[in-house]
Image (cartoon, rainbow, N blue to C red):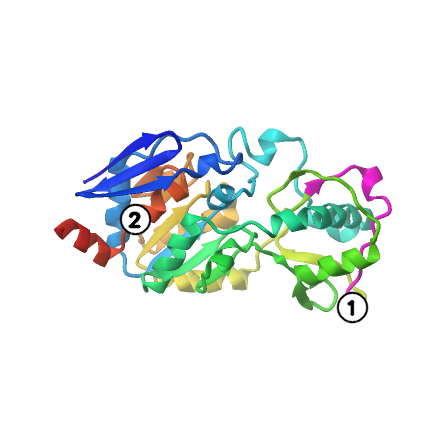
Amino acid sequence: MWKNVSKGSKVFWRINNVTCSHKSHLALSEYVPACPAPNPHQVEQLQDFVSRSRRLFVMTGAGISTESGIPDYRSEGVGLYSRTERRPIQHAVFVKSQAARQRYWARNFVGWPQFSSHKPNAAHETLCKWERAGRLHWLVTQNVDALHTKAGQCRLSELHGCTHRVICLGCQTVTKRSELQERFLILNPSWNEQAHGLAPDGDVFLTDEQVANFQVPACTKCGGILKPQVTFFGDTVSRGFVFSIYEQMNQADAVLVVGSSLQVYSGYRFALKAQELHLPIAILNIGPTRADHLATVKVIGRCGDVLPHILLRDQWQEESQS
């Protein structure tokens, strides 16, 4: 039987006679919404759900990365939409406007050292351990921060791309974002503007006056426009890529959604696909989600306060017998 005891920023979980402690990530990030301690009964249901699965399909959203210090857009009270009137750049605007690209890259240049330094947290590491144990069949993330890759996840699809890669819109050549940072430094040796506030994609806030003299390089191969290899708002994920993820879901026996409200259809469609395939769905998220009515298990809580204490089948059986 699971039960928890909260003391300050510590959450203690007990199963039988084994006690584990985990420091709440709320103390580590200003971008994590307030959340009560998880309900032990809900956690026990999630434990049973995961322990029964042999080929788990996992979808993660911004809620897993806020605990690493990366803000999201929609979290109540702390998300970008709650804190500011600014909105992420639209795909069409980036492609059509040189001024918009200059503004975007100037802000991204300033924010990159901080954004790229974020590290995976306990939830990312737990999912990676599940993969190494052979129980996590596939993971699709809506995040563009590369934290799953940094944690060592291999069976992974980045639904909306990754900010650590840059693509040329002309010749489609893909390069590392870190290499582009070096080119920015060469072109703008004396450019030293101060940023205000990090966004979920590594963007920061600068005034038009601050970005007026910022120089943006072109593709070294064809002179084309460089863009982060991510799906901007207003763009779509390719059908072929979505179907390749469906193929992985076809081989799964259960679906777990972690840290996503599924408000954007590009993520919600996978919950609908799971329903079509008659796969059971569990959801771990702080707030309500678009797929709550489809879930057989729903846990309200922070990812890092729950996932590290969920045991796989063999571990669960060992603990239950001890």
Residue 191 or residue 141, whichever sits in front? 191
Q: Viewed as shown, does residue 311 lie left or right of 131?
A: left
Is residue 249 visible in the rendered image? The answer is: no
Label 2, secondary structure: give it.
loop
**What's the magenta region?**
204-219
Label 1, secondary structure: give it.
loop
Residue 10 or residue 268, whichever sits in front? 10
- Packing grade of label 1 (10 A; few <14, some 14-19, many >=20) is few
Q: Which residue occupies 41% across, 54% down? A: 125
- The verdict on residue 200 being magenta is no
Snapshot quadrant of residue 103: top right
- The verdict on residue 206 being magenta is yes
Residue under label 1: 220
Number of labels in the image equals: 2
Which numbered disc covers residue 310?
2
For the residue marked with disc 2, what is the amino acid? Answer: Ile
Q: Which residue occupies 45% across, 64% down? A: 154
Snapshot quadrant of residue 209: top right
Principal SS element in the magenta part?
Answer: loop
